[in-house]
Image (tube, rainbow, N blue to C red):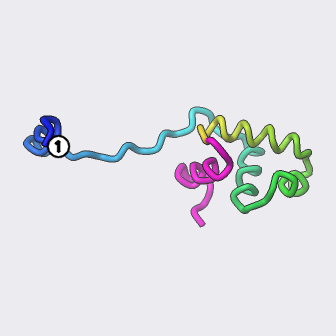
Amino acid sequence: MSEVAGSIRQHGAAIRPVPPQLPIQRLSIRELDVLHWLAAGKSAGDTATILGISVCTVRVYVRNIMRKLDAVNIPHAVSKGHQLNILPIP
């Protein structure tokens, strides 16, 4: 057993999981709309049609969402949205 682990056991310190980081910047209302539809499985094209905006604009929102949530792709952004209670858990 390592010295650190022995010291932790000896002193009765509890190891706690690190809570997820909160996003540095809040999502805009439109970014939340886009994230909602992406979480529902809609494509960028479908989301654009639903929201009455262009596909290019949806892609800009998606990039902003991923940057703000520190996500590497859309499923990761949706997962973080659930973890942060931005999206309801299905």
Q: Specify whether 79 is left or right of 34.
A: left
Q: Which residue in the protein does label 1 denote?
A: 13
| Residue drawn at (66%, 40%) of the image | 66
- Relative to the observer, which residue lies in front, 72 or 38? 72
Q: In this picture, is 32 found above or below 21?
A: below
Question: In the current view of this chain or complex, which residue is farthest to the bottom?
Answer: 90
Question: In the current view of this chain or complex, which residue is farthest to the top?
Answer: 24
Q: Secondary structure at mark 1?
A: loop
Q: Is residue 74 magenta?
A: yes
State the image coordinates of residue 36 (x, y, percent, origin top left): 71, 55
| Residue drawn at (48%, 39%) of the image | 21
Q: In this picture, is 38 found above or below 71?
A: below
Instruction: Tell me the quadrant of the picture where the C terminus can be found.
Output: bottom right
State the image coordinates of residue 81 (x, y, percent, origin top left): 60, 50
Residue bounds of the magenta highlight: 72-90
Q: Specify whether 58 is left or right of 69.
A: right
